[in-house]
Amino acid sequence: MDEKTLQRLADRDAIRDVLMRYSRGVDRHDVAALKSCYHPDSYDDHGHFKGNGQEFADYILGSLAQRTHHTSHTVLNHVIELDDKDPDRAHAESYGVAYLRRTDAKAEEWLDIFAGRYVDVFTWRAGEWRILSRTVVHDWSFSQRLDPGSSFPLQISNFVQGQRNSSDFVYQSRQGKFPQPVAKKPG
């Protein structure tokens, strides 16, 4: 494989890392991770927010903290096209689905699902790829009030519970903090 092909693969992988870090930043309320996805002079059009990407990071985390208690942002199919004329520019279209769970003013639980696409322009500066421009395209969405009598068939209490801050397991595991196995009783 020639050097140009290897560099293009490395660039695509670095851009994918930015896309994944964005989702983690939103769901774990990690403002530093979220801001690291955007150049300082970036622009983000998220429909309800249109402005600087760095400022969007603060805005969305504040908004989600007030409106939701659980979120999961997923990045699905994506196409990354490196610009043949400008090696420091790339275009990406990434399909995404956001699941948001919230409690309304009547204490009713809701599940909101937003499906759309991130249409991004990435640029390479200071040794890294970041988003220069992002437009979120809405494809479809859905809201459903959850039945208070419904239950999940698994014992959820047996799982490590996700957190919306630096105490989440993904951060703790990097510090060598792992759950200890429970000794089984003989017999």
Image (cartoon, grey):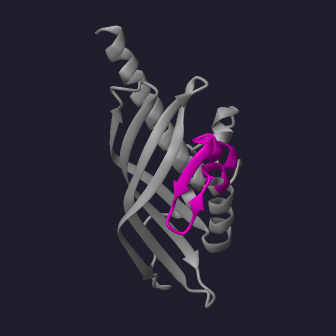
Q: Quadrant of residue 59?
A: bottom right
Q: Is residue 145 above or below residue 82?
A: below
Percent position of residue 178, x then y: 65, 38
Q: Is residue 164 visible?
A: no
Q: Is residue 37 left or right of residue 114?
A: right
State yes or no: residue 67 in magenta: no
Question: Residue at position x 55%, y 57% from top?
Answer: 158
- In this view, which residue lies farthest toward the top? 2
Q: Is residue 40 magenta?
A: yes
Residue drawn at (57%, 28%), measured in percent from left and top?
A: 125
Tell me if 127 is positioned left or right of 113 in this view.
Answer: right
In the displayed orientation, state which residue is furthest to the bottom.
Answer: 106
Tell me residue 53's x, y (percent).
Answer: 60, 51
Residues drawn in magenta: 27-55
Residue under the point 65% across and 68% down: 63
Residue at the spot 38% in from the left edge and 72% down from the top edge: 141
Q: In the shown orientation, is residue 8 left or right of residue 128?
A: left
Q: Residue furthest front?
A: 85
* 52 to the left or right of 15: right
Residue 177 position in % (x across, y down): 69, 37
Q: Quadrant of the N terminus?
A: top left
**Quadrant position of residue 184:** top right
x and y percent of residue 86 in the render?
A: 41, 26
**Residue 93 in view of the camera:** yes
Q: Nearer the viewer, residue 11 or 40?
A: 40
